[in-house]
Amino acid sequence: MKIKAQIAMVINLDKCIGCHTCSVTCKNTWTNRSGAEYMWFNNVETKPGAGYPDQWEDQQRYKGGWHLRKGQLTLRSGFRWQGLSLSRIFYNPNSPTIDDYYEPWTYDYQKLLKSPVRRHMPTARPQSLLTGEYIEKLRKGPNWDDDLAGGPQAGGRDPNLRDLLGEEVRLEFEKAFMLYLPRLCEHCLNPGCVASCPSGAIYKRDEDGIVLVDQEKCRGWRYCTSGCPYKKVYYNWKTYKAEKCTFCYPRVEEGVATVCSETCPGRLRYMGVLLYDADRVPRAAAQPDEQALYQAQLELFLDPHDPAVIAQARRDGIQEDWLAAAQISPVYKLAVQYGLALPLHPEFRTLPMVWYIPPLSPMVSVLESRTSGSVTTGFFPTLEQMRAPVQYLANFLTGGNPQPVERALRRLLGMRHFMRSLETGQENQEQLLETIGLSEQTVRHMYRLLAVAKYEDRIVIPLAHREESRKAHQEQGKVGYAL
């Protein structure tokens, strides 16, 4: 057993209102410069939808992540030496192009400022930030399909709906459903970008698990952009280097939340430490059954209260303050103890570390209209009749396995009914707790964390130990897929 610590995040989709504050603040902090105009380290997508870049979830097209080949874990884009063959060294056919993102533009504001007095108001034409030429018609933007999930033009292009269109999902207006999905780099335990880089420029930090790019070693091969299944590694067309979400590591090292977490009005992001067994990562990623990958990754996380785990963590160099932070980590509570948070596309086999609580709000109105008031006989059996199909949520949260999603939704619904029953004096509380498989104390703690948690409850990040990373550069490029 080799215990390592990872700074992870949980995002509560039940609270996201699609305001894009996280995207704008991240953009102004990290990519507000030439060459990075089209980069959005954090973006919020409307689901169902094609996403950004276009249909990024379609790995038959982009060849991102891993798959099993003859029982062995292999990059979808091929072995590293296959990618470096002379026929493909200067051309990556699987990498998304600028048309898959969008052509960034500005407006000719000088025409407005310097326009003389005239009868008609002057207009500012859109101007490409890549070529400097005027754009006659804008065709795509970073959030082009925002709030358009209800129709076939946007929702019908969602790869997660391919097997559901027809009987289960109808895109008519009166039966439409929609949810928001904030996305950033997953800082995976088995990152495909690290394994894909021919130069070894991308590395996963040993002290906190954050994945970064060494700008000095990067040679702009762009295999990382295709190797990342979440398409959160970008190519800077001006510096000819790769760039990606840094998880705001300068802030995290000081115990401060990322910019997207700090500025979120809904307070829907949680950050904390997870302890995991690094020796079991290859076996978990190579789980043959895609629907069992969620459980395989869940079993990697170790109980920070277990004396044996604590003793081994100390021997592996985990500091005491990091152990203390892991014991009160909100991420551990939501993902492991409560079973509410789920990984994004575990079938990509990268073992992502930004997890999501499935949304409930778009479904409650439909659900409650069909209940007879009974918790056990009228409420839970209608879970499958909610407007957003459970199978659709499972397609991008658990690799197609609906059982973990159903369990999370039942517990969220049960928590709401239990807390409401305390105010209204309803009975059958014990029966409700037995149905959802949680104790009264656990439900109360879960309610506090999800509803009224303070900043120090949602963000638990220990200070970085700089003395432990003095020789970290020697390990750079040595993690990931081994040759």
Image (cartoon, helix red, strand yellow):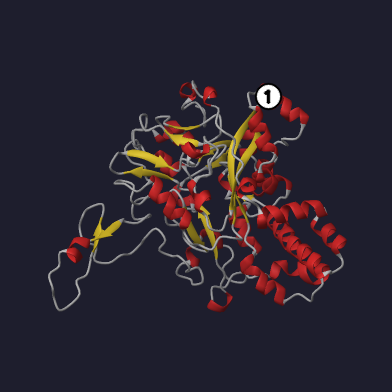
Q: Residue, x 43% and y 65% (percent of image)?
A: 145
Residue 402 vs 322, above or below: the answer is below
Q: Residue, x 46% and y 40% (percent of image)?
A: 246
Residue 69 vs 62, above or below: the answer is above
On the image, the x and y values in percent for residue 101 come to: 37, 54
On the image, the x and y values in percent for residue 305 come to: 75, 35
The quadrant in which the N terminus is found is top right
On the image, the x and y values in percent for residue 97 come to: 35, 50
473 or 137, nearer to the observer: 473
Residue 40 visible in the shown view: no
Circle 1 packing at 10 Å, graded few (<14), some (14-19), many (20+), is few
Residue 435 vs 304, above or below: the answer is below
138 or 41, nearer to the observer: 41
Label 1 sits on what residue type? Arg
Is residue 285 left or right of 243 when viewed as pictured?
right
Residue 171's image quarter?
A: bottom right
Q: Secondary structure at mark 1?
A: helix
Is residue 420 left or right of 344 when viewed as pictured?
right
Q: Which residue does the numbered mark 1 point to in the structure image?
A: 314
Is residue 423 left or right of 449 when viewed as pictured?
right
293 or 352, nearer to the observer: 352
